[in-house]
Amino acid sequence: MSTMQPGLFDLFADHEPEQQPRAEQIGEQSWVLRGFALPLIDQILPALDTIVAAAPLRHMVTPGGFSMSVGTSSCGPLGWITDRSGYRYSSVDPLNGLPWPQMPSVFAKLARAAAEQAGFADFHADSCLINRYVPGAKMSLHQDKDENAYTAPIVSLSLGLPAMFLFGGFSRSDRSQRIPLLHGDMVIWGGADRLRFHGVLPIKQGRHPRLGEQRINLTFRVAG
Ligand code: SIN
Ligand code: FE2
């Protein structure tokens, strides 16, 4: 655990001390910011509802032909997709051929503030991937490698049910740290850590007071 520099939480200055976020360093350039998004939750959740009403969550198919256990959508200029022909980014939703919903300004602001707190200034995400996990859904260990460059960090927000996040090394067989992620927590990894393997263990049964029986993860990236 390390203490954050003063002055960087201007967005959160009017919140109670017990709500002030805490930073945990999990790698050379990787951080968990506990509760970082909580002050903005009442703006984030309705914005999310609007996005998934326009671009519904769907179970995408991997190149190998497996249906993913998470339901996926996106907002912003580019959305990550997968189907039998591969993993890639698309400027349109393949379900309807329309551009993905715009990235809400509260998402962009939150992602930029979290990246800055983790030492990555000027983060301007052009993609926000939305993954919905119901109990039992998981994400196998993988690297985020479909982006054009790896200079920008990955910025992730967890909402709803808790998850056990696996934060591994640079090869799949490296030992992973197990990091519990709760509603409002953010994880940022970039620079030397940008290509670390990561994943999520199967979500346990439960009911979250705001989101019910689900976990939603938002992953902000510079893809294009
Ligand atoms: C991902 O790596 O795509 C998702 C990570 C998470 O759900 O926390
Ligand atoms: Fe990922």
Image (cartoon, rainbow, N blue to C red):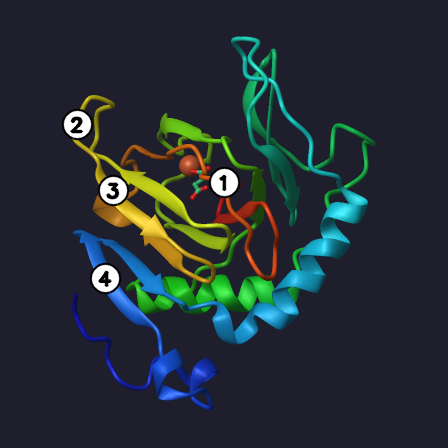
Q: Position of residue 37 (x, y in %)?
A: 48, 67
* Residue type, label 2: Asp
Residue drawn at x 16%, y 31% as measured from the top left: 175
Q: Do the residues bearing badges 3 and 4 touch, measured as CB atoms within 8 Å?
A: no
Residue beneath label 3, please? 178
Q: Name the N-terminal-most of marks 3 and 1.
A: 3
Ligand 2, by image quadrant, is top left
Label 3 sits on a secondary structure element that is strand
In the displayed structure, 183 sits above or below 136; it is below
Tell me: 141 left or right of 47.
Answer: left
Residue beneath label 2, please? 174
Q: Mark 2 against mark 3, which lies toward the viewer?
A: 3
Q: Residue furthest bottom?
A: 14
> 136 or 89: which is nearer to us?
136
Residue beneath label 4, please? 24
Residue beneath label 1, please? 205
Q: Which mark is residue 108?
A: none
Crowd class of label 1 (few under 14; some 14 to 19; many from 20; radius 10 Å): few
Asked where in the image residue 60 lies, by quadrant, the reply is: top right
* Residue type, label 1: Gln
Tell me: 3 left or right of 150.
Answer: left
Q: Mark 3 against mark 4, which lies toward the viewer?
A: 3
Crowd class of label 4 (few under 14; some 14 to 19; many from 20; radius 10 Å): some
Q: Mark 3 against mark 1, which lies toward the viewer?
A: 1
Q: Do the residues bearing badges 2 and 3 touch, measured as CB atoms within 8 Å?
A: no
Real-space Cα separation, disc 3 to disc 4, in angstroms: 13 Å
Q: Mark 1 against mark 2, which lies toward the viewer?
A: 1
Instruction: Inspect this view and state whether residue 121 appears.
Output: no
Q: Name the N-terminal-most of marks 3 and 4.
A: 4
Q: Position of residue 51 (x, y in %)?
A: 73, 51
Label 2 sits on a secondary structure element that is loop
